[in-house]
Amino acid sequence: MSDTAAESPAPTADEALHTTLDVPFDDAVPFVQIEHELADFETVRVTRLDQMIEGMLGHDNVERTALIVVCHPEIAYDALSIDPTLAGMLPCTTIVYEREGDDLVHVHHVSATKAIRDLGCAPGDCDDAVEDLVEKTGELMTVVWENIEEHGQE
């Protein structure tokens, strides 16, 4: 890997959404899930990674971490319309986690549609459709994020 690549993250990572909440972790997870659902994202699954790792591997040193896996019907429809194989990059996932020595709960989202764009997963003649998909996803997730930041404080 070149020095330039190590210094500058790919656009997908660089443009990720991140915020912190000053609420208990056990309240933050359902709150973040509901904010997605209010923007018409369907919850596919909520998984506690820390509990899964402890249960399956016996490691009890993982900070509390939850994956909120959601899918928006418009995003799914548009992705499938571009190419059915893009469904393998869906759904969207937001992570809620704690860090040692930090009293805040972190909320982080990396765009699946930006990853589709940046990894070149769509057929070569679909650049405009992929950009439209990225834009639509960004608009929908902006609503979610603004609501999380506005309503996510005690």
Image: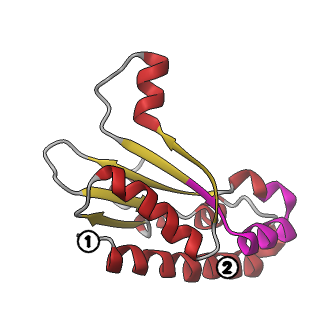
Q: Amino acid at mark 2?
A: Glu
Disc 1 and disc 2 in contact, CB within 8 angstroms: no
Disc marking residue 153: 1
User: Dot 2, how many residues are within 10 Å of its Cα: few (below 14), some (14-19), or many (20+)?
Assistant: some
Q: How is the image coloured?
A: secondary structure
Q: Marks 1 and 2, Cα distance to the nearest angstrom? A: 33 Å
Q: Which disc number belongs to residue 22?
A: none
Q: Residue sitting at 45 percent across and 57 percent down?
A: 30
Q: Which residue ends up furthest to the top in the rendered image?
A: 58
Q: Assign a secondary structure to mark 1.
A: loop
From the top left corner, tell me how far across and down residue 4 is, in percent.
37, 58
Q: Earlier in the sequence, mark 1 or mark 2?
A: 2
Identify the image quadrant of residue 126: bottom right
Q: Which residues are magenta?
A: 69-86
The answer to whether residue 3 shows anywhere in this view is no
Within the magenta stretch, is there residue 77?
yes
Query: Main structural element of the magenta stretch: helix, strand or loop?
Result: helix
- Of the 4 image quadrants, the one containing the N terminus is top left
Foreground: 43 or 10? 43
Amino acid type, mark 1: Gln
Locate residue 88, reporting x and y percent.
74, 51
64, above or below 137, in the image: above
Q: Taking the image as drawn, is residue 147 in sight?
A: yes
Residue at the spot of label 2: 131
Side of 139 relative to 79 (left or right): left
Left of 145 or right of it: where is 129? right
Residue at 49 percent across and 71 percent down: it is: 35
In front: label 1 or label 2:
1
> Within 10 angstroms of label 1, few (less than 14), some, or many (20 or more) residues?
few
Residue at image point 69% right, 54% down: 89
